[in-house]
Image (tube, grey):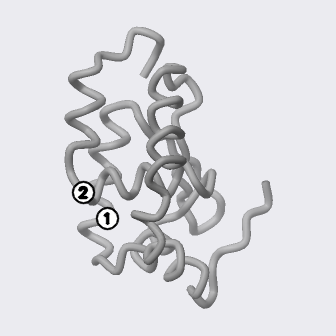
Amino acid sequence: MSETANPVDVFKALADDTRARIALLICAEGELCVCELTAALDLSQPKISRHLAQLRSSGLLADRRQGQWVYYRAHPQLAPWVTALLQGALAAHGHWLAADITRLQAMAGRPVRCC
């Protein structure tokens, strides 16, 4: 998603509660894998993967593989206004994710990142 990101596409991608929570959690944490998102959101792996695929295809997220793990982060070429939108939403409504963050922090066996 480049500087020419279409606002309609961005808002459509974030219009779902699960996708919005995923995007904001990743914004808060910097990078998360599917197992961390399933623990944080208390949802099944297929449901999380389906939403991640939509966020990736919309250009909001990028992924990288490290061994058996696939990590998701904000796309490096994300338009600055989209980054500001996500950070602003997180700053203003971080409490909306409180239960998700608590579950994430309580997750046993979180993968260790090398980078």
Q: Is residue 21 left or right of residue 87?
A: left
Residue wearing tag 2: 17
Q: Disc 2 vs disc 1: Cβ atoms closer than 8 Å?
A: no
Q: Quadrant of the N terminus?
A: top left
* Residue occupying the point 58% across, 48% down: 64
Q: Is residue 16 above or below residue 4?
A: below
Q: Position of residue 31 (x, y in %)?
A: 60, 54
Report the quarter where the C terminus lies: bottom right
Quick one: 91 or 73, which is closer to the camera?
91
Three-letter amino acid code at disc 2? Asp
Q: Residue furthest right?
A: 114
In this image, 67 relative to 60: left or right? right
Query: Which amino acid lies under the numbered mark 1 shown in the image of this protein?
Result: Ile
Determine crowd level at label 2: few under 14, some 14-19, many 20+ residues with C-alpha closer than 10 A: few
N-terminal of the pair, mark 2 or mark 1, is 2
Residue 61 picture location, percent across and down: 45, 40
Q: Nearer the viewer, residue 73 or 69?
A: 73
Disc 2 from disc 1: Cα separation: 12 Å
Q: Quadrant of residue 11?
A: top left
Vertical position of residue 101 compared to residue 26: above or below: below
Q: Secondary structure at mark 2?
A: helix
Q: For the point 53% across and 40% down, which residue is it? A: 87
| Residue at the image point whose x is 28% and y is 54% from the top | 51
Q: Residue furthest top?
A: 4
**Crowding near pointer 1: few (<14 within 10 Å), some, many (20+)?**
some
Of the numbered discs in the image, which one, if any, rests on residue 113?
none
Q: Is residue 53 above or below residue 87?
A: below
Along the line of sight, the residue nearer the viewer: 63 or 14: 14
Q: Return the mark for residue 48.
A: 1
Picture residue at 21% right of the left edge, 23% below the top: 8
Q: Where residue 105 appears, x then y in whole percent?
A: 60, 80
The quarter of the displayed image where residue 82 is located? top left
